[in-house]
Image (cartoon, coloured by chain):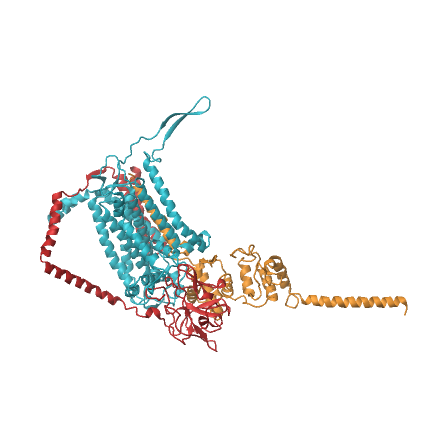
Chain colours: A orange, B cyan, C red
Amino acid sequence: MSAVATSETALRRRILRYGLVLAVAGQILWSFRPAPGRALTAQEAAGQALYEASCSTCHGLQAEGTGSGPSLHGVGPAAVDFMLSTGRMPLANPAAQPIRQPPRFDPQEIAAIVAYLTAIAPGGPAIPEVDPQDGDLPRGAELFLNNCSACHGAGAIGDSIGGGRIAPSLYASSSTQIGEAMRVGPGLMPKFAPQDLSDQDLNSIARYVLWLRDHGDRGGLQLGRVGAVAEGFVAIVVGLGLLLVVIRLTGSKT
Amino acid sequence: MIVRRWVDGVDERLDGSSFISRNLRKVFPDHWAFMLGEIALYSFLLLVLTGTFLSFFYLASDEPVTYTGPYQPLQGQTVSAAYDSVMRLSFEVRAGLVMRQIHHWAALVFMGAIIAHIIRVFFTGAFRKPREISWLIGIGLFLLGIGAGFTGYSLPDDALSGAGLRIAYSIILSIPFVGTWLAYLFFGGEFPGPDILNRLLVLHIFIIPLAIFTLLGAHLAVVWHQTHTQFRAPGRTEDTVTGTPVWPKFALKSIGLALTTFGVIALLGGLFQINPIWLYGPFVPYSTASPSQPDYYIGWLEGLLRLWPDWEFHVFGHTIGELLLPSLVVPGLVFTILALWPYLEARASGDHEWHHFAQHPREAPVRSAFGAVGMAFFVVLVLAGGNDVVAKFLGIEVDSFNTILRWTLFLGPVLSGSVTYWICRDLRDRPRHPMAAPPRVTFRRNAAGGFEEIESETPVAGRPSEERDRT
Amino acid sequence: MRRASLVVAIAFGAATLAALGLFVVYIAGGQPQVEGALLFVALAGIGAGLMVWATRLMTGIGQITQSRRHAQPPEEKEAAAEAMAGGVEEMSRRRLLFRLLLGAAGALGLAAIFPIRSLGRAPGASLFRTEWRPGLRLVDVDGNLVTRDTLEVDSFTTVFPEDAVGSGDSQAVLIRVQSGSLQLPADRLAGAPDGYVAYSKICTHAGCAVGLYLARVHQLRCPCHQSTFDVLNGAQPVYGPAARALPQLPIEIDADGTMRALGDFTAPVGPSFWDLPP
């Protein structure tokens, strides 16, 4: 063989060798990318971009959690959708109580993030299908009073529950968010499992909460549905106040 | 003409002429602060009138029935007959809801007017001899009012008042030796007991109103007989009373106040919702909702319960529960001191004379300071009773709010008492009230551009009141 | 004066119209807000009219000064004291009869109090017992059996004995926590299998139903006065005015997942009373 032909063969062999190493290395590295172990769909990819921009600082690039935020593995799409659609997440200050705010993302973006997290951290309760029209109003009232009113108030207006937290008013919630919260148990809230409160029970409770929101009461101004504290205040300030004005005007001052 | 014939008729049968003329000519001082008791009286009258209407519709029974009325969230639910009767009254009886709400608002205004009246009598020293007995009767009426309110709002058997009944039962249980017996006697057994609604009804529409009527009658008769106190003014003496004759002027003004009181309470009853039992649902012993407060005039007791530490005592193998001190001992002490105040003050000041003049608060700085202390305690405790609601309203964490309240409970009265004392003493030692007669100085600008005083005028010494109490 | 009488006239006129309006509203079926507003105008209209009439229009009637009563002259007081004392003395002269009278009155007074006993029964041992017995299955408020699968971790529900649903004194709250996280003494732990633990729902402070479960911190809280109990630690009170832990209901789980009570609560339920042993 000629010298040129030998160096060409050696070069080709060298290229093949390095290429093989690169291919193997690439395969190894590719296997470390997050699950699903398949290509991300367009929606999941969009979700990944949003997640890495807004959430990964506290929840980790693989949703494994960091010092500032818990792991999202196993929390379920219901939790993610709840937190994002109520604006509780993203949370600027990890130490603060997450409260309802205008959501940062629109519904498509939320769906994308949910899809992405479902792909890389599967498990947990799915987003419940809550249909208030399918619920039974009296059953919902009974379930609400027995299970929810201790924290959220008989009128669903919320109350202080200690531990630095407030069980919020439910008047701004959608029926899906009500169902999600019951399955997920966000914050200090306990979970309500399907064997305890069925999906039909969720429909009924959501129906009652929406009914409360949409119906005033016959008695007049509801004073926030808070009860005796507001009533006492009105009795003194309005009732006695008006009468004090009357007697000041008609009595003498000596 | 008709009047003359009527008077003749009365006189022939009852020898009433001198009685009529003496009492129609009787005078009452006109000061506006003396009308607070009337507001209480007329609120009570409204309570009796609306309450009579309500009592025709209420059923005091815990028999379970199925609700079939128009309020949708309760349809088909099992509720007690009592709860059902109040729901029917609220949703199906014409004018039922407005009557019920007027009745409840009247109770709140009644208690508020009593408290305002007690404050007025206290700060003006009108409880001094010879009026100690009116004071005692008045404190009794206050206690009866609390009892009437508690029994009344427990009648609808809703979840909120049921929690209150449970707490009352537990308070009775905590009494040493006889607590369990008393609780079982009153409730007819273990909570909730078979008869409690009926017993509350008997108390609420018979026993307590009878007691109130009797004491009220005595209260008014004593005031009438002793003549009302009045503030000092030129021309007034201890031995005379100056005011408006009962007929026609004072009576008409008073009737006018009665109707105006009715009107204001009716306005509340129609425009502001109160005690929406349909939201709370029927009482079930295994569910308590939040927020959970009694009416405000019991709210101070609730505040004591929430702020009191978890002290439980064990004596000779028995238990004295955490409820005894804050719900019975402390209120018992407070009411005892309140009731005995005329005698305590007379002892402390050495003043055993008759007094028909009402004092201005500044004339008795120590008494006014104590009054301010009491009011501050009351206000902080009422706020504490609603601590979860107030904390949420203020955006504070409720457990921290409790700490703030505990500090305020001690520092607040100290502050209000001292400030009141110094203000009163300062005002008392001035010749005239600085707002009534501020010191005047007249200035003139001189040619050089500066100011110089021409004359200064301070009000002349010599106050309207000659008598100064040493308190 | 003229303005005042105009005010009075308007007030009475408005009151009349409002009262007529009340007829209309009532016949039309009633409406609470309108009824309240019309009642206000009708009542306060007459009231205000009367008050203005009395205070501003009856100017001819001025203030009058009258003398107050004085203490009675000494002779009167003497006579009164003698009249009272005389009557008592007349009776107490006959000492034996007087004492017998006092004894009889006292005995009758005591006897009159006795019917009060009919109002209720003796407490007996009822405060120390509830309806729970060994072997009774746990059911929820609808009467459905509670099994191992009913709750997830961080869930809770209210349970009753299967033959006493809704019973006030037997009410219990069943909580599921992470298995192994309960810090109970060994004998108590035996009654809390697999992270399931049941406590009385009656607050040991004043008896309200302890229905707030703060899942993440494992605390039960009472809505009435904020007593807070640590679920992992035998429901010991950690905040608020309660001084005693919630009694535990020992339970077992059958092979098929049915949950049964092992006996009554570990202590009397509800608030403290005199006979409660320390």
**Residue A21 in picture, x, y percent from top left:** 75, 67
For the residue pair B362 and C102, the one nearer the viewer reads as C102
Counting from the top left corner in percent of width and height, residue B315 is at 33, 62
Q: Residue B66, image x and y in percent?
A: 35, 68
Which quadrant is the N terminus of chain B positioned in? top left
Q: Is residue B43 visible?
A: no
**Could you say which is closer to the camera, residue B269 or residue B204?**
B204
Which one is nearer the viewer's eye here, B25 or C115?
Answer: C115
Q: Residue furthest top?
A: B447
- The quarter of the displayed image where residue A244 is located: top left
Q: Residue at x 23, y 54 (%)?
A: B213
Q: Is residue B349 left or right of residue C208?
A: left
Residue B246 visible to an observer of this rendering? yes
- Residue furthest toward the bottom? C255
In the picture, measured across the screen, residue A143 lies left or right of residue B329, that is right
Q: How many marks?
A: 0
Quadrant in which the C terminus of chain B appears: top left
Identify which residue is drawn at 25% across, 56% down: B209
Percent position of residue C202, x then y: 39, 65
Which corner quadrant of the image does residue A51 belong to?
Answer: bottom right
